[in-house]
Image (cartoon, grey):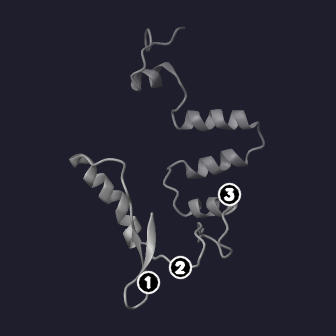
Amino acid sequence: MGEWVNNGNGEDFRWWLLWIREMFVWEEELKQQFIAPLLTAQWKRGVSDGWIWDEDDLYTYSVRSRYKALQEFTLSPYHELFRELWSLKMASPTQVCVWKAMLEKLPTRGNLVRRRVSVSSNLCIL
């Protein structure tokens, strides 16, 4: 897929991406979007490839470190209510049901109609 090439000042990585067939015109833009991040990446010879999680000092991913990172970017108006909900001592399925109700994600007739799911009527059956 590529090789290291001497450029006079050191080495650069050059991509040799071969495609099975000729690209359609509409695929050229998709190809450029795919290749753009590859061209801007800084490659280092002799260093193994891997993921780096820079949200903590150890550079290791954990659910706790992700949770802490998400705490800074909470956009939900229900953030405090959700925090209270998840801290309550109740069965997880009950918490999930309440959470879905708060977000109006339960499959009620009204929600199904809003999502354009075919139901006989959006009126209460009682």
Q: Residue 63 carries which label?
A: 3
Task: Give the CA distance from mark 3 to mark 2.
Answer: 31 Å
From the viewer's perspective, is 31 left or right of 99?
left
Mark 2 sits on what residue?
Answer: 45
Identify the residue shown where x is 33% and y is 58%: 33
Question: Could you tell me the amino acid type at mark 3?
Answer: Val
- Give x and y (percent) for residue 76: 50, 50
The count of marks equals 3
Mark 3 lies on a secondary structure that is: helix
Residue 68 vertical position relative to residue 41 in the rendered view, above or below: above
Q: Quadrant of the C terminus?
A: top right
Residue 7 in the image: x percent, y percent? 37, 85
- Residue under label 1: 11
Numbered disc in front, either 3 or 2: 2
- Disc 1 residue type (three-letter): Glu
Instruction: Depth check: give the residue in front, 123 or 33.
Output: 33
Q: Of label 3 and label 2, which has the lower sequence position? A: 2
Structural distance between the alpha carbons of marks 1 and 3 = 38 Å
Q: How crowded is mark 3: few (under 14 residues within 10 Å), some or many (20 or more)?
A: few
The percent position of residue 101, horizontal first and vertical second, equals: 57, 33
In the rendered image, the vertical position of residue 75 relative to residue 59, given as above or below: above
Of the image marks 2 and 1, the number of the one nearer the N terminus: 1
| Mark 3 in CB contact with mark 2 (< 8 angstroms) | no
Which label number is shown at residue 102? Answer: none
Q: Are marks 2 and 1 in contact (CB under 8 Å)?
A: yes
Looking at the rendered structure, the secondary structure element under dot 1 is strand
Disc 2 marks a residue whose amino acid type is Arg
- 74 to the left or right of 19: right
Label 2: how many residues lie within 10 Å, few (<14), some (14-19) or many (20+)? few
Q: Where is residue 6 in the image (x, y as percent from the top left)?
A: 41, 84
Query: Tag 2's secondary structure?
Result: loop
